[in-house]
Amino acid sequence: MGNPTSSTPDTSKSEPLPPGMVIGPDGKPCKICTAFRHWKPPGTSKPKKAAAAGTVAATTVAAITNSDTDIRPAHCPPDVEILGRATWTFLHTTAAYYPENPTPAHRTSMLSLLKSLPLLYPCVHCAAHLGENMKENPPKVGNRFELSKWLCERHNDVNVRLGKEKFDCAKVDERWRDGPPD
Ligand code: FAD
C-alpha cells in the first residue's frame, strides 16, 4: 500500500470522489477516515482493489476483517473500519469489566479515557461526531451497568449514522463479557 499523504492530489480539477472516500481537514484524502475498500490512491481513477487472497503470499495475507471484500495484507495500517472495530472492542470490554462499585479513581480514569477520545481519536470526523454527541450525552461512569449502556447507545448513534442496524443494548453483557448461553 502506498503512502497517500506523500503527495497532494489536485482536488481543484474536481474529479468526483469515489463513494466512501473521505477528505481530511488538510484537504487531502484522509487515510484513517476511509475504508480500505474505498481507497483511491492519488493519480488513479478507480478505488484500490483489495488483493485477492490467492494472489499474495499466504504469509503476508490475513483476513483481518469480517468482510470478504476487504482482505488486506496484515502489514497495512488500519483503516476506519479496523480501527473502529478494535476501539469498540476495547471500550465495550473495558466497560463490561468496570467495577459495579467504582472508586473515585476508577471514575476519574474512565472519564478521562472517554473525554480524551474526541481529542485523540485518529479519524478526525469520527472524533468530531463523538465530541458533539458527548456534549449532549455526557459519559455515565457510576457503575458498569450504566457505563455499558451509555457506551452501547453511543455506538448505536454511530451505527444509525452509518445506516446500520441498532444493537440490542440488553445484550451487551452477552456480547462483551459472558458469551452466549449454552
Ligand atoms: P462495529 O460497529 O465496529 O462493531 C463491532 C461489534 O460490536 C459488532 O460486530 C457487534 O457485535 C458489536 N456492536 C455493534 N453495535 C454495538 C453496540 N451499540 N453496543 C455494543 N456492541 C455493539 N466509521 C465511520 O465510517 N464514520 C464515523 O463517523 C465513525 N465514527 C466512529 C466513532 C467511534 C468512537 C468509533 C470507535 C468508531 C467509529 N467508526 C466510524 C467506525 C464504525 O463505528 C465501525 O467500527 C466500522 O464501520 C466497522 O463496523 P462493523 O460493522 O465491523 O462493526
Image (cartoon, rainbow, N blue to C red):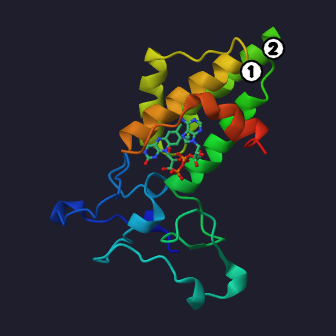
Numbered label attached to residue 105: 2
Q: Is mark 1 within 8 Å of ligand 1?
A: no
Instruction: Give the residue at the far left of this rendering.
Output: 13
The type of residue carrying mark 2 is Ala
User: Does 176 sit left or right of 55 as displayed?
Assistant: right
Instruction: Give the residue at the far front of this rendering.
Output: 182
Splitting the image into 4 quarters, where does residue 15 fall? bottom left
- Which residue lies under the disc numbered 1? 109
In the rendered image, residue 140, in percent from the top left (x then y), is placed at 62, 15
User: Considering only vertical position in the picture, is 37 above or below 179?
Assistant: below
In the rendered image, residue 61, in percent from the top left (x then y), is placed at 65, 78
**Is the residue marked by circle 2 packed among few (<14), some (14-19), or many (20+) residues within 10 Å?**
few
In the rendered image, residue 182, in percent from the top left (x then y), is placed at 79, 45
User: Considering only vertical position in the picture, is 38 above or below 43?
Assistant: above
Depth check: 16 or 14 in front? Answer: 16
Residue name at image x 73 percent, y 43 percent? 180
Depth check: 175 or 144 in front? Answer: 175
User: Does 11 sit left or right of 136 as displayed?
Assistant: left
Q: Is mark 2 within 8 Å of ligand 1?
A: no
Q: Are marks 1 and 2 in contact (CB under 8 Å)?
A: yes
Residue name at image x 36 percent, y 70 percent? 40
Depth check: 144 or 82 in front? Answer: 144
In the rendered image, residue 12, in percent from the top left (x then y), is placed at 18, 60
